[in-house]
Structure formats: C-alpha cells, structure tokens
Image (cartoon, helix red, strand yellow):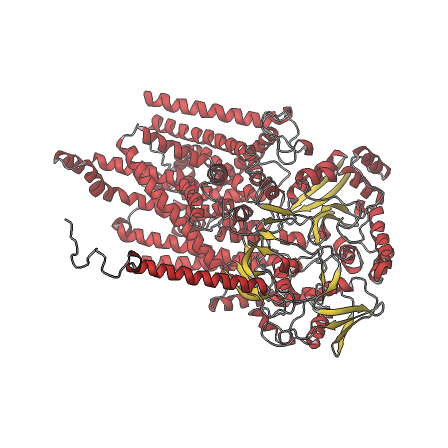
Amino acid sequence: MNLRNRNSSSKLKANETSFTRHKGLKFGVALVAVGGLVLTTSSVMSSSAASAPSGQLIIANAEPISAAYYDPASAFGLVDDQLASLVFDTLLKLDKKGNVSTSLATSYKQVSKNEVDVVVRTGVKFSDGSALTPADVVASINRIFDPKSPLAHALLGAPGKATASGNTVKIVMDKPFGPLLKSLAEIQIEPVADINSPDNWKVKPTGSGPYTFVSNENNDITVTANPDYWGTQPLIKTIILRYIEDSQARLSALLTGQVDISTRVGPQEIAAVKGNDSIKVISGQGPPSEIISIWRDSGPLKSVKVRQALLHAIDRDAIAKTIQGGMNAVPLNSMPTNMPMYAASSVSYAYNPKLARSLLKAAGFNNNLKLTMATSTLVPKQTEIDQAIVAYLKAVGVSVKVTQLEVGKFRSSYSNYDMSLNTIATFNDDPSFALGIYAGGIGKAVFGWQDAPFDALFAQQRDTTGTARTTAVHAAQNYLWKQARTLVVSDENWVFLVNSRVKNYERAPLVGEPLITSASVG
Amino acid sequence: MKIRNRSGALLIVSGAAMTFIVIGAIIAPFFLVDPTQIDLSSALAPPFSPGHFLGSDALGRDVLSRIASGARVSLIVSLLGMIGSLTVGTIMGLLSGANTRWLAWLSDRLIDIQMAFPYILMAIVIVSATTASIPILILLMILAGWPSAARVIRSIVLSERPKDYVKAAEIVGADQKRILIRYIGPTVVPAILTIAPLQASAMIVMEATLSFLGLGVQPPTPSWGGMLLAGKVYLSQAWWLTTLPGIAIAITCAALIGVGEGLAQRLRGDRRRRVDLGESQTLTAGAKQ
Amino acid sequence: MRYFLSRIMQALVIVAGITVSVFFILRFTAGDPARIRGTIFANNAVLDTYRKQFGTDKSIFQQFWNFLSGISHGSLGDSFRYQQPVTGLVLPALQHTLLLGMSALLISVSLATILGTLSARRPRGFFARISTLLAIISQSAPLFWIGLLLISLFSIHLGWLPSGGFMSWKGLVLPAFTLALSVLPAEMRVLAASVRAELDEDYVRTAHAFGIAEWRIYLVHVFRNACLPLLTVIGNDMGILLGGAIVAEVVFNFPGIGSLALVGLNAHDYPLLQGVTIVAASTFVLVNLAVDLFYTVINPRVRLGALE
C-alpha cells in the first residue's frame, strides 16, 4: 500500500529552485566551500612555515624493554637504547658514518690528551619545562664514572671527573682516553632532579630530546615529537616501539603495513622479502658487532699451533654463506669489519683441513684431541653454527663433547667449557669495546687469559687520542689475530627491513635511533 | 569366525610393520651416509636430489639417514621408558588393590596428583633443575606413563578381588603379597601386554614433543623431535624437513597402536574376558600431553 | 559435605607442596641471575647492584620467607627478564591459555557430538570410518606436528590465517583446532558408544512407534541420557587440553603460560618460571576439583560412595 504523505507536496513552491529546496544539498555545498578554504589556507601556511611533524612510524622489535627504570644509564637492550636515543640528548652525536659532531654541545675541544671541554647550549628545556643547565650535564656524566653504574662500560671504568665553569663543562680523565668522544655520543643527559630521585624513572623518562615519552602499555611504547625541541624538528610526529615476539608475526605485520620497520632481522626474513619493492633492506648501518667462539685459554687450547690448526679446520666462509644466508662479512682480524680502524690481516687462516691436521700433529695430537663445548640458543642460528663447528673439527680428528645449556646457565658457564659461542655487540663504534673483552679483568673472566703484552697494547690504544691511535689499534688487533686467540666466526650485521613509505631512514653505528629525526613517512 | 580373522589381520599387518621398522632402525644406519656428516654446499636440498633421497637439512645432512638414526633413539628411549613405566605402574596398581587401607589410599593419591599436574610443566621444571639428557628423558617418560598403567591394573585388581578364588585363598590363609602375585597376578599379565604397545606409542610421541621443546634429546644426536624443531624455521622453504620425520613418527605409532589393538581384540575373542582398556585416550592421557 | 571439604583440603595440600618444591628446586639449581643480566663487561660492583635488586644476595631461607610474605600480599615477585611483577605477566597469559583451552573444548565437543551421533546411527558408515581415522591420526601424529602441517597449509600456502601470535581472533583458529584434535577421538568414541547404547533402549523404540520425528528423538531424549559419560570425558579432557595448550603455544607462538614458562626456563628467570608453575598447577588442581565436585553433584551414584 502506498501511503503518500499528502501534506508534503512534492511540487516546487514559488521562489524555490530545486537547489535551494534541498537543505541537504545546501549544507553540503557550504561544507565543501569552507573545507576548500581551510585546505588552501593551511597549505599556504604550511608551505611557508616549517612543516609540522606529521604521521606515525611503528617500529617492530623482537624484544620488550629490558630495564625496570627508564634511566638511560641502565639501558640494557635494544629497546632501552631506542627509547633513550629518542627522548634524551647527548653532548655529541655520530652521523651515518660514525663521524663525531656537536649535538647538545655547541662546540667541543680536545684541550689536552686528558681533557675535553664542551660548551653547553643555552635555552634548552627538558620535557617538564625545566631548563637544562651545565649542572645537569655534570651530574649525568659523573654518575657514569661511578664504577657501580651499569653504564660504566661506556667509559670502560676509566676514572675521571666532569666540572662546570659557566657554560663550559670540562671532562678531565685521569689518563688519556681514546674512546672519550665516542662515549660522549652515548652518554645521555638527564635532569639532576631525576638523578637525585631515581624513583621518578619508574614513571617516565624526562629528557630534552626530539621526542617526549607518552606511554608504555600493551607492548607499545609511544613517543611524540617535542614541540619545544631546540634542534630541527623531527619530521615524524609519533613513533611507536612495538614488541612482537614471533618472527613470522613480525614479518607479516611488516608486509601488511601494520608496522613500518622491523629491526634485527635474520636471513629467513631477508629471503622472504626478496623482490618485494615495497620493502627496503637496510644493511650495514648498525653498531659493529661480531659472533665469536670464546676459546678458554686452558688445556690443549693453550697451544698456538692447536688454535691455528682449529682455525684452518673451520670453513668460516661456508658458514657465513650457507647458515647465515650471506648476510654477514667474515673478518680477517680480531674486530668486526665495520669497526673504525679495522684492517684485514695478511694472514687469512683459510679453510685447509690438511694443514689443520699437520699442525695438530706437530702439536702432538694425532686424532686424539678432545674438547668440550657448551651450546645454547643465545646467538642467532647458534645450534647450526655450533654443529657445523663440531663437524668440521671431527673431520680433522678433533672430538668435541657438546653440552646443551639454557641461555641463563650458558652465560654464566663460560669458564667451564673450552668453547662457547657468543655475540659481542658494541654500543658504539669504538675499537676499545671490541678489544676490551680480551684485556685485563674482563679477559681473565671471559677467556681465562691474562697477558701483559696485550694489556699494554690495549692500554696504548685506549690512552692515545687522535690519529696516532690508528697505529696502536692495528698493533692490538694484529697481536690477537696472529696468535689465533679465538675463533671470530663472522660479523653480526644488523639488518633492518623498512617499508618504502619511510623516506630517508638512516642509522648511526649505534644501538639507538638518533638519526630518525630526518626520516619522514608517507 | 569373521571377527577373529579381522583381528588377526590387524595384528599381522601392524606386527609386520613394526618388525620392519625395528629391523630398519638397527640395520639401515650401516648402509646409509653418516647422519652427522655436514656438507654446507648441499644444504637444504629437496627430496630426490643427487645423494639425498629424502633431501638434506640446513647443514647438508642427509634426511633419510637422520630419520633412520632417529628411529634408534626413539625406539630405545620408548622401550626403556615403557618398561620402567609398566613396572612402576604395575606395582602401584597392585598396591592400590591391597587390603591395607593406607597403602591403597597413598597410591591412589599419588596417581591423582600425578594426573593433576600438567606433564609438560613438570618436564620443564625437572629439566631446568637438572639438565636435558637421555637418562632424564627416560625418567620423564616413566613419570608420565605410570599413572595410566597403574589405573588399569588397579581396576583389574579391584574387579578380581571379590571373586571366589581370591576369597578362597584368603580363607586358606594366604597373605596379601601371595594373593596379589600368585593369584591376581596372572590375570593382570594380558592387560599389561596389551597396554605395552600403546604406552610405547605414546612415549614416542612424548619424546618427540620434548625434543621439539628442546627438553629431550640434544643435538647433534639425531632425533625425530629434534629434526622437527630444527626444521620449523624453514617451514616455508623446506617442507620436507618437517613433513618427513613427522610421517615416520605417525607410521611407527600407528603400527604400535595396531599391535596393541590387535592383541586386545585377540584376547577379547580368545578368552571372552573383558580386558578393561578404559578409553585408549585415558590410557595415554597422562602420557600424551 | 565431608567429601567436598576433604577434596578441597587435598587440593590445597597439593598446591602448597608444588609451591615449596618448585621454589627450592629452582633456587638450588639456578645460575646467578646477576651474571645473566649484566653485560660481558660488567664488573663485580655492577653485579652486586643487580644482586641487591633481585634479592639474591640473601640466604635462601630469607628469600623463601620474602616470597611467602609476598604471596600474602598477592605478589609473586618480580621477573628478572621483564623487570615487572610476575603476576602482571602470568595472569594475562593464563587468560589467553584458558581462552585457547575453552575454544578447543567447544570445537571438540561440537564436532564430537555431530560426528559421534552420525557414526552411532550407522556404525559401518562413512562418518564412523572418519571417526576411526581421526582417532588413529590423533594418537599417532604428535600434536605439534599436526600444528606445523596446518601452519604450512593454511598460513604459508593459502595465506588464510596467521601463523602465530594473537593479534586477532584469527590467531586463535589454528591452535584451537589443533588442540581440539587431541581430545576429539576420545569424546567421539564415548559419545558414539553411549548414543548407540541409548538407541537400543526400549523408550527409543517406543518413541519411533509413536511416530515422533527422528531428530526430535535424538535431540530431546537420546542426548540427555548420553551426555553423562561425555561429561566424564570432558573432565579428563581439561587436563589434557591445558597441558596440550602449552605445546600448541610453542608451535603457534601463542602468548599463553606455556610460552611464558619456556621464556622463564631459557632466560633462567626463576621468579617467572616459579610463578608460572604455581599458577598453572593451581589452576589445574582447581579445574579438576571443580569438575569432580560438579560430577558428584549430578551423579548421585558417586555421591553415595559406590564403586568408582
């Protein structure tokens, strides 16, 4: 039944056009007109003024944040460093190539071998509105000199003191310290108030950096661009650090566009995005890092001939190519290939099982060398690498007894086994961090090795600054290499997968992401 | 008569399959390539590649050879585990049927507690307290399998108890131990024989599961579960690494179950005695998780 | 009533026993968590700071006392790895695992009902054969292997479902289905047997004679009586499901207590492992208790203390 409402006539009244009649249409036109006006105005405004940060970037990590506090000096893992690098400032910074330049400091000067003076920028504010003063800088640095500080390794425990006079902060080391400038690119500046009440860090980090901490919930850490940042405004407004544990899930999140960047990927993921134009593979832009097999200096491994024999028995190139999918370079010296002042040695320890056998024989072992190995799942592809090593050694008459430990026990059991695989990730690209594991107390703890000549060489490069340092670094790394101190399996190349909608993504050779301020999305 | 033939057929076929598998596991490794021999240049080769009939794994090791060697480990571990589990289970089951109240109550409670506790968690705690190794693995098998064996034995004992011949023995003055072993004992034996293959089958699955979680047989010793664990990463590139060992497990278990079922049917047919198997699932319930 | 109380007491004793033994086992055998936390460069002063933070610098009995007093406040300690209260990690994980278990139960009971009834109607028919096949597969093929195959098919080749994680309800389908397969055969068998038994009963023949529609007979009469044995099996299944869930979680990377337990094991994070074990065991004990008590309520024969 057709009920027509006779009261609303469908005929036009006088003075009405069909346009004016329809209220909806009128409203719509008005809306479009206003909208157009707004758009043109804003685009004019934005093109003339500096573009405000826009867009959102989501970074997928394989791990959650590690530290209980948001104290950057307690930063323990990847995510901690990511967050600290976004929220805090450092006095100096590293560019993509690892060159030092100013950041929070307006200038710096190596006054003498022991001392670096920096001039602290004025007018910088922390995210809570308080002003950043040289006192904050001094306090932040001095706490690192405390040997109990977890970040003490940034200064390798070398003693010193920072003092302020006016706007200049003098950092005076007791002895010359080669890694000082790089360390200053890593030590974050925090408010004295937080240093004195560390419980503040249970709530949130307060820094002066390009981003401000917003929240940490449900596996997402959110930061937003700091409008009062003293430096160039970041181009991306919001960054989210997202924890996705499963590698398959991370990969599909990246492929479906749910996240923009996937960090620390392995050969499986790289193979999965081959030929995919919307995903870029960013390789070789991480902190120098390497995979080594820790060889304890005891028993048969005390003999140089034995160690050299073992190195010749293992085909490192095949391991890098097959097991690691070709993503890692194989160093020809004791440091990662992308460590500054790395120099390939003339001695290559090429794969040569026959030579290995004869060296073993010369050392007095004829198919009767027995070694022990601890294995775990700490290092990527560790099971396969360890099994490959065992098989290679078996082929030259060395039998290896393998014990499987879970990660925690593994990390505290190096002294009980002849061989244990490990990754040495340096926090920034200074040679001292790669060479330091062999020196002094650390060398003793890790390798059971204490060697005065090497300690001298290590001290030499640590205590030299400037260009003279290169010779010292070469001497130290060659010393280790020539005596086949341990097995350096390969570099550990940090590879990142980045969606092509992210433009200008660059990394400094650090763990954190300070250069992300020049990246943009969309 | 038809029934007997069918049960006979099942028993024969499964028995033959099992024999073949066992003989293969013992002999084949002598004819095949060394399962721990790596060859990085032919890693991840698909089946029917030259030199690798069933393909090769991430380190270039031959899959066929590893499956054959893994069979050895799986069969030995399950055999020992089964023997241990049946021994403990029979003792506990007999005790549950004993006349002494507290003994029966104690073994009942132990059975209940065991079955209440999730077996994998127990395995995780025990492995974290000790280490992952084959003896520990066998221990875990025994711990997981004995409750279901005990339950079956207990129900038999409880149903035999009220019978005349037992009462007669009691009147004559036979003590508990004698009754349990000499009188009720023989009734229990066929049940044990029938449960045995089912327990073994469940233990093969258990070993694979524990090795898959990293709690069982450790590399480089080849094991079926370990092969599946290693192959999981290559699921999209190398399907044969996860499919083939699993098929080996499935066939072996199916054969064992066939033997068990065939025996059960045989016994049912022969003696007209209800061998209480419960539900096969409950039997393996404690074991299978 | 006495039965109820004694069962509850039993349950409490079991939980207490598990708590104490897990605590001491883990503490005595663990490595030094401070060493694990620290970088390879960490010196002793740093390690001592960690030890203080973790409370591992105190005697074991002091630690146990702290742990117990913590429990009375509802705290299970702090995880070394995640640096968060363990309760905050375990409870959401428990929810996920329970969700997984319940979904699997739902799927399996539904399938069991349908397949079981259909195979009871025609014992030699198509569905009966499918049931037998499923039973064999589920008993001979390990749960995790079936899971891997399903991932291979539905996730990698067909791309219909995610291979892991729990981002959306889709992430629940494969693990729940795999888990359901592990308990399906027993349920089917029991249901088929009891339905068949019911079908032989006089009242069914009478109902047929009266001309009542077959579907009505099944729905209204047969099921009501056939349900009881199924409930027993379900009681059993709870344990199997919650245990199997742990394995399924590893295969599908599902964020439940199984995954958490393995993280605890691998990271040597014994507050976490301990917390997970205690909570999981208590849950199982509770569930079993509930099922037992429920069963005694509905089955008067048990209540009256007759044969088990």
Q: State the residue lying farthest toward the bottom.
A: A166
* Left or right: residue A495 compared with residue A309: left
Depth check: give the residue in front, A120 or A368.
A120
Q: Is residue A168 above or below residue C298?
A: below
* Left or right: residue C92 compared with residue C3: right
For the point 44% across and 61% down, which residue is it?
A35
Depth check: give the residue in front, B11 or A108.
A108
* Left or right: residue B285 compared with residue C127: right
Which quarter of the picture shows residue C131?
top left
Q: State the residue lying farthest toward the front.
A: A15
Measured from the top left, where is residue A110 in percent x and y?
82, 68
Depth check: give the residue in front, B171 or B17.
B17
Asked if residue B56 shows in the view, the reply is yes
Measured from the top left, where is residue A418 in percent x and y?
74, 47
Name the quadrant of the N terminus of chain C.
bottom left
Measured from the top left, where is residue A416 in percent x and y?
72, 51
Depth check: give the residue in front, A196 or C71.
A196
Which quarter of the picture shows residue B229?
top right
Count of numbered circles on the image = 0
Asked if residue A238 shows in the view, the reply is no
Q: Is residue A143 above or below residue A395?
A: below
Measured from the top left, where is residue C68 in percent x and y?
51, 66
Q: Is residue B41 above or below residue A264?
A: above
Which quarter of the picture shows residue A275?
top right
